[in-house]
Amino acid sequence: MKSARMAIFASGTGSNAQAIIDYFAGNKSITIPCLISNKEECGAIELARKAQIEVRVFANNEIEDGKLLERFLVEKNIDVIILAGFLRKIPRNITSCFPDRIINIHPAILPDFGGKGMYGKHVHQAVLEAKKKQSGITIHLVNEKYDEGNYLAQFYTPILENDTVQSLEARIRSLELNYFPFVIEGYIKSIK
């Protein structure tokens, strides 16, 4: 049986990318041939290079157009795309080419606090201002609309009385690092 080939898309420091790289290191049935970014300099690129994973950077307009990106993914025989802190909307031609094969992690419980501009500290600030009793993460499939694909899993953490954006963000990050790779593996095994 051929291995599933996974492309990681990342724009930031790369903590989720690193967790995924570490989790799948040595895995013969799920491999990571490449990491794609829209930023020439981001932490995820260095982490991928250290792990000897090919890195490819596409300008924002190339991502929006999607043609070069699609060609690259097809050439690499990519089966599944993982969005690990990728801060660009995935173009329709890519969502069409990879239906139910693009997985994202969102740092809140969807459907609340999703959509354009809802990422990182913005999400945690919105959750705290709404005086919610809990937050968490949503791991979901990606379609052509922000944060509206089918959910694969949600994991929760309580909002504590004296939480700040930073303290909530730290607990959410811990959920991401613990659960995202595991959910990815389970989903890929279910569609192989």
Image (cartoon, rainbow, N blue to C red):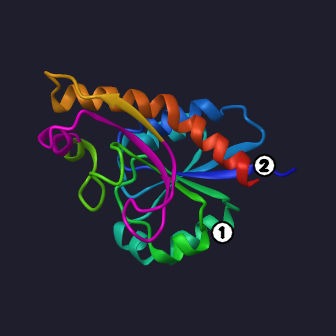
Residue 24: x %, y % from top left: 65, 35
* Residue 74 circle label: 1
Residue 132: quadrant of the picture: top left
Residue 58: x %, y % from top left: 43, 64
Q: Residue furthest right?
A: 1
Residue 72: quadrant of the picture: bottom right
* Residue 3 circle label: 2
Q: Which residues are magenta?
A: 124-153
Identify the amino acid type marked 1.
Val
Residue 98: x %, y % from top left: 60, 67
The residue sitting at 44% across, 72% down in the picture is: 91
Badge 1 or badge 2: first in the primary sequence: 2
Above or below for 112 versus 72: above
Nearest to viewer (mark 1 / mark 2): 2
Q: SS of the residue at dot 2?
A: loop
How far is mark 1 from mark 2, CA to CA?
15 Å
Q: Nearer the viewer, residue 31 or 95?
A: 95
Q: Is residue 82 left or right of residue 172?
A: right
